[in-house]
Amino acid sequence: MTGRRRSFTAVAAIGVLAFAVACAPGNAGGGGSTPASSAPAPASDTETFTPPKVTIGTAEDSKGPAPAPEGVVRGGTVTMLDRDDFAHLDPGQIYLNTESNMALLYARGLTGYKRVGPNEYKLVGDLATDPGTPSDGGRTWTFTLKDGVKWQDGSPITSEDVKWTMERLFAPHITYGPAYIQQWLTGEEDYKKAYGGPYGGKRLDSIETPDEKTVVFRFKEPHADANFALAMTGYAIVPKAKDTKEKYDKEPFSSGPYMITSHTPDKSMELERNPHWDPATDPIRGGYPDKWRFEFGQERLQITDRFIADAGEDKTALSFYAWVAPERLQQVLKDENLKSRMLRQPSPYGNYYYFNLDRVKDIKHRQAINIAWPTRQLQQLEGGPAANVISTTILNPVVAGWQDYDVFGMKAKPEGDIERAKQLMAESSDPNPTIVYAYNQTPIEERKTVVIKNQLAKIGINVVPKPLARKTYYDQISKVDNGFDLYWGGWGQDWPSGSTVLPVIFGPVRDGGYNLSHLRDPEIDAEMKRILEMADANEANAAWAALDKRIMETITPIVPDTNDIGTMLYGSRIGGAEIDPQLWTVSPNLIYVKPQ
């Protein structure tokens, strides 16, 4: 996002943010930091929750160890139960909340988020001594590495590792992950044309390392929020000496409290303590258990039933993102015995069904699908209003400046307005089109696909379902020539502004990119550029909200999906369990094993 200008005080004052990740695969994420006992079920489709407060910390705040939860003890093994293995372990390839959450166990960046209280966080220095020092109006940012930060082999983490990490993100084998820093360093949206990475010997002059502990970023334009961007997992540091390029995605080298000791893809993974991680340098991660053991291949209903039973080793188990299965939600919410180990929080992400505008070119088709969409039926499949609320906007309500609207009357007629949709289809270029609908192959998504296919058949649209592998779902739909017409995707802001939503999901169209609708519109591009250059944050927030509605009215690149409210259980011997409101997953940072 070149050309962005905001005051430093405006960034700090907004005080609400969510990590930008493409959301968890298949509508399964995680979220929140408030136990269910203090977060009641929503009374209606319009109930809202309090967003987290985030401020910028100091050098003192950046010191370790991390604040410990009450009653914490060290030792023991945590079993993590989830559906899918992780498609990426290389930080540079990570832009999913589930993978970002996992990376907290082994990867550290220059900055990060320290929990200082319930629903309250500070942006602090992680490997750096503080959240960074801006100069030259925000064009230059300087970071100093802490003493005693080391890799898993005991070698020091240096400024050269930081520079190398940023440079390798330009290499061809890095196809996923955030693009902010790369664009800011080169001044180019298509940053890989400006620089191809360090492996051939060419280095970036815009990153300086005057000594082993100091790194200086020189951006083409001011970026007051660069320290927020660098807190993203995609910018966690990779050691130059251990960079194995493509292979690093399978065997990352640890700077965090744990290191991967075994991994059987799609079945299991084990992590043990990194002996060279020093909690005195880490204000974010507790690192209390001795081991983490991951079990993959578990469906939501299986996991829910295991947590309800709470037997044997499942007492020391949790899930990063497996919400209570819809079949059990009402049972769980009504069971007083489960409330002490239940978490509940709404999603900070926007959920969408993206149209591929390269293929679904008639706007009347897109509008008719929105009007006929079976919103209520899909909501019920996820558990009803207790599990998700109807959304009609692109921006999520937690985004600063968000404004509600309902262009296609989804809230008025959540079952779909078939007759109105039929009229639009009759006026369209083809009243009986065929569309290919790609979906994440999970039990719930299978049922949703049947509902969508049957509903759209009522207005003359033949839906051809195309199931996709769960583990690589986003990799497949993010190909430009993907062969699909409609598919689900989620997005959350990187920090509290529409500038980290609309310019990303409607930004450059490229393989591995995030413009899943392939929207290319000069007028929209010009308006986004105008807003990015606004100096006043409140004015910019209002402009993003207005553009949100304009895009839906004039282009209709998506069908808004419901916004999830996550409810999750965990084992009775797990302590410190909270849903991170920035990642919408259960954070590993405070987890400990209670004694028997």
Image: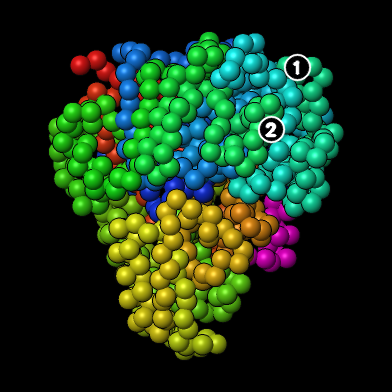
Left or right position of 541 against 573: right
Stretch in magenta: 519-533
Give neighbour class at mark 1: few <14, some 14-19, many 20+ (Cα, 10 Å).
some
**Label 2 SS:** helix
- Return the residue at label 1: 212
Q: Position of residue 12 (x, y in %)?
A: 61, 30
Whether residues under marks 1 and 2 lie with C-beta atoms below 8 angstroms apart, the answer is: no
Q: Position of residue 7 (x, y in %)?
A: 70, 34
569 falls in the magenta region: no
Q: Residue 483, located in which quarter of the rendered image? A: bottom right
Q: Position of residue 14 (x, y in %)?
A: 57, 35
Residue type at tag 1? Glu
Q: Is residue 475 above or below residue 53?
A: below
Q: Residue 306, located in which quarter of the rendered image? A: top left
Residue type at tag 2? Thr
Alpha-carbon distance for marks 1 and 2?
15 Å
As drawn, the label of residue 165 is: 2
Q: Is residue 103 above or below residue 563?
A: above
Disc nearer the start of the sequence (1/2)? 2
Left or right position of 124 against 308: right
Give neighbour class at mark 2: few <14, some 14-19, many 20+ (Cα, 10 Å).
many
Q: Is residue 432 above or below residue 108?
A: below
525 falls in the magenta region: yes
Residue occupying image coordinates x 54% and y 34%: 251
Q: Is residue 179 visible?
A: yes
Q: Is residue 525 above or below residue 494?
A: below
Asked whether 464 or 522 is in front, the reply is 464
